[in-house]
Amino acid sequence: MKLEYTDGCICTSLTVDGKETVDMTPEEIKVSIRAMLDRETDIATLQDVWMSLIEHLGEYKDLGHCECCGDWISNYTLEI
């Protein structure tokens, strides 16, 4: 399976074996995502994918800011 991502200028392209993802079914895309996840062993990369999906699909809650350092605190919750 050859996965390619091209970005820049006016072109963004995601392909699996030369087929654009816009021409694929959601199930076909999920197969390639599962294959990538199954081969990944780096915990930091897996956590990054996890956080991205939780932020995208989860419910956002603003917890305000820290009185000590001023950072804003966000919470995302996703129930599956």
Image (cartoon, rainbow, N blue to C red):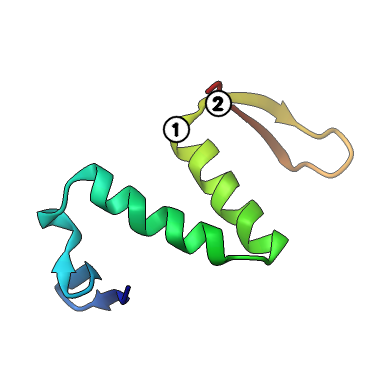
Q: Alpha carbon of mark 1 to alpha carbon of mark 2: how far?
A: 7 Å
Q: Which residue is mark 1?
A: 57
Q: Position of residue 58 (x, y in %)?
A: 50, 28
Q: Residue flagged by tag 1: what amino acid is it?
A: Leu
Task: State whether residue 16 is above or below residue 46.
Answer: below
User: Could you tell me residue 27's position as x and y percent?
Assistant: 26, 44
Q: Nearer the viewer, residue 35 or 43?
A: 35
Front residue of 34/65: it is 34
Left-right relation of 26 to 36:
left
- Disc 2 residue crowd, few under 14, some 14–19, many 20+, Cα 10 Å: few
x, y percent for residue 57: 44, 32
Residue found at x 22% / y 73%: 17
Q: Earlier in the sequence, mark 1 or mark 2?
A: 1
Query: Is 17 on the left-hand or right-hand side of 38?
Result: left
Kind of residue sitting beneath label 2: Leu
Residue under the point 44% across and 60% down = 35
Image vertical order of residue 80 relative to residue 31, above or below: above
